[in-house]
Image: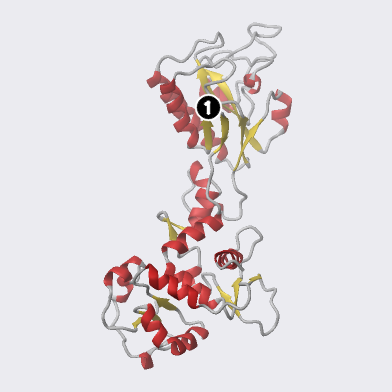
């Protein structure tokens, strides 16, 4: 860790704490003389007023890729600082190693300036990298705890579809789990050809039968969502007591069942065989046959949110998540000293992300964010 130099001896502990700098600063002897600032130092400038006085020295220090923090005492200093920037061109970014020889670039990764790396920036209690992988890509819903577990995998797809579907269609769509409305008796439709060995029996070696079968002969119907009962990629959500349209009437029992079903869905997804979940656009619990009372519907809706489904009275849809640019925007709004430093660096250098991908390069996000803020 580099030592921190403080340009002014009257330390504003509240400001330092706001930017998570005080805990680092207190471990070092304070340096007040700019002559002692070198490549092994991070410089904190006490106020924008001090920055204006020492601007030439600070800009020279910054040009050598040294780290500077300009502290702001209030909103008026923030406004004044950003108005002072002499922006002559749009902010630019570099993809991977595709930059011209001699072009000035600034590495905004953990291999460069960690202040602008998603591994060292925290948002809602998580590093931005973890937030992206677990919240935006939704892997956290399924029990994953770290970006290391899912980096490189595509976002979890939560897809409402228009029914009806057939058993053959769903069986062929092996990349997705399908949710279907079930009943607590786990059976519907008539046994075909034989009561004891029907051709529409749920396979006894299926995961569904192992978890929900209880040793009985179960069958699937020729229509309704439950036509897919017993398929490897089909998961139940119970909305009625039985096939005779008897409505759920025991809330405590229903909650236990839903918890078991949600756990079943999560465990199926964690096998790594699926890209996401598909389900009918119809509201769970308020469909063709089921008519849940509000207290049952509220409990079911809360549980469906745990797997990324927003079960509204207008229909079921994915729970909305923030985009990565929105996360960075909110982060920098809460950390104006870092935003000002980023804007100052970008006046003369292009942001470079050596780990560039087309979907989530922070260098591209930073350039676009600043261009939007400054209307470039």
Observer able to see residue 210: yes
Tell me: 29 left or right of 231. left
How crowded pointer 1 is (Cα within 10 Å; few <14, some 14-19, many 20+) is rated as: few
Question: What colour-coding does the image apply?
Answer: secondary structure
Observer able to see residue 214: no
State the image coordinates of residue 349 (x, y, percent, origin top left): 59, 79
- Residue position for label 1: 313
State the image coordinates of residue 133 (x, y, percent, origin top left): 53, 53
Could you say whether the residue bearing mark 1 is in a helix, strand or loop?
loop
Among the 4 quarters of the image, the one containing residue 244: top right
Number of numbered discs: 1
Q: Nearer the viewer, residue 32 or 194?
A: 32
Query: The N terminus is located in which quarter?
Result: bottom left
State the image coordinates of residue 84 (x, y, percent, origin top left): 49, 78
Q: From this view, report whether residue 363 is shown above or below residue 216.
A: below
Task: State the residue at coordinates (69%, 9%).
Answer: 192
Q: From this view, report whether residue 197 is shown above or below residue 9.
A: above
């Amino acid at each position: 860790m580099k030592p921190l130099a403080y340009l002014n001896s009257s330390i504003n502990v509240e400001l330092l704490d706001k930017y998570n700098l005080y805990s680092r600063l207190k471990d070092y002897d304070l340096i007040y003389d700019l002559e002692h600032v070198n490549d092994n130092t991070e410089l904190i400038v006490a106020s924008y007023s001090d920055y204006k006085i020492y601007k030439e020295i600070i800009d020279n220090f910054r040009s050598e890729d040294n780290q500077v923090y300009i502290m702001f005492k209030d909103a008026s200093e923030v406004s004044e600082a950003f108005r002072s920037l002499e922006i002559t061109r749009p902010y630019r970014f570099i993809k991977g190693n595709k930059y011209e020889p001699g072009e000035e670039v600034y590495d905004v990764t953990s291999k460069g300036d960690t202040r602008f790396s998603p591994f060292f920036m925290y948002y809602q209690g998580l590093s931005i990298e973890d937030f992206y992988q677990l919240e935006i890509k939704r892997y956290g819903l399924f029990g994953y705890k770290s970006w290391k577990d899912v980096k490189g995998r595509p976002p979890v797809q939560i897809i409402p579809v228009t029914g009806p579907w057939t058993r053959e269609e769903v069986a062929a769509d092996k990349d997705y789990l399908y949710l279907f409305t079930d009943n607590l008796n786990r059976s519907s439709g008539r046994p075909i050809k034989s009561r004891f060995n029907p051709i529409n029996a749920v396979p006894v070696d299926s995961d569904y039968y192992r978890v929900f079968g209880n040793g009985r002969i179960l069958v699937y119907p020729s229509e309704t969502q439950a036509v897919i009962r017993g398929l490897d990629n089909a998961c139940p959500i119970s909305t009625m007591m039985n096939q005779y349209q008897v409505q759920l009437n025991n809330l405590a029992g229903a909650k236990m069942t839903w918890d078991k079903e949600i756990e079943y869905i999560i465990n199926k997804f964690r096998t790594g065989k699926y890209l996401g979940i598909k389900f009918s656009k119809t509201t769970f619990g308020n469909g063709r046959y089921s008519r849940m009372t509000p207290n049952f519907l509220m409990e079911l809706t809360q549980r469906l949110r745990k797997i990324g489904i927003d079960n509204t009275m207008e229909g079921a849809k994915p729970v909305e998540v923030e985009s990565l640019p929105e996360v960075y925007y909110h982060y920098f709004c809460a950390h104006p000293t870092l935003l000002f430093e980023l804007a100052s660096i970008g006046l003369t250098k292009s942001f470079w992300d050596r780990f560039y991908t087309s979907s989530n390069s922070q260098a591209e996000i930073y350039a676009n964010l600043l261009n939007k803020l400054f209307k470039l």
